[in-house]
Image (spheres, grey):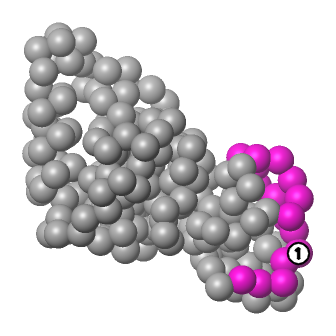
Amino acid sequence: MLRVVIDTSSLVSYVLTQGELMSRVVAQWRAGNYVLLSSPATRAEVAAVVTRPSIRQLAVALLDDLITGLERFSEHVPGNLDVAGACRDPKDDKFLACAVEGNAHYLVSSDNDLLDMRHFRDVAIVNPGQFLLALELYSEESVAGGTWTPCSRYPRDVGNSHHLVPIQVVGSAGCAPGVGNHLHVCHGDLIIAAKVGAGL
């Protein structure tokens, strides 16, 4: 199952707007379709931000449900890893640390300071829409006998950013060897998910 960190910017967007993409991301979490990871630092920041009077006044989602959900229904990582200086905004380092410490496949963010990094170590950094594409690909892994592999550092060969692109590849450390067809979700010059199977 996919292991995922969602940063405060995306969760705040959800409580303020309940926009379609983040509503789907949250619904997939509540349905148990991926593992949400959190650390003491990430939970504390989310709780501090969403309980601000200005946020409470504008919120259209139940704030207490979100905070309780993070406490009860996310997988807690210890928060011992220090990646100070990894992001140009030091406040975002906690999400990178949580993702690495929790062996996350994806860090979902709406913050350009994180999104511009594209990946950190073996974690792909994506926006909510890109994550939903990857999650859909993962959920369909049984189709035609394909297998799904998250990829965070493999350069894409062809196709447009943010689209599903069928291509042939020769393999990499993060992807299955290039036999048969590979269906990739691309993020800029990175492949963020790959599905492999001759029947694709």
Please provide percent x and percent y for residue 119. Answer: 54, 59
As drawn, 176 above or below 52:
below
Q: Is residue 46 among what the camera can see?
A: yes
- Magenta stretch secondary structure, dominant: loop
Please provide percent x and percent y for residue 129. Answer: 57, 42
* Highlighted magenta segment, given as a residue range: 157-172
Q: Is residue 87 left or right of residue 132?
A: left
The amino acid beneath tag 1 is: Gln
Dot 1 falls on a residue whose secondary structure is loop
Residue under the point 47% across and 39% down: 113
The answer to which quarter of the image holds residue 195 is bottom right
User: Considering the image in quadrants, where does the N terminus appear?
Assistant: bottom left
Please provide percent x and percent y for residue 143. Answer: 69, 74
As drawn, 177 above or below 155:
below
Residue at image mark 1? 168
Residue under the point 65% across and 85% down: 173
Extreme-front residue of the structure: 85
Q: Is residue 132 among what the camera can see?
A: no
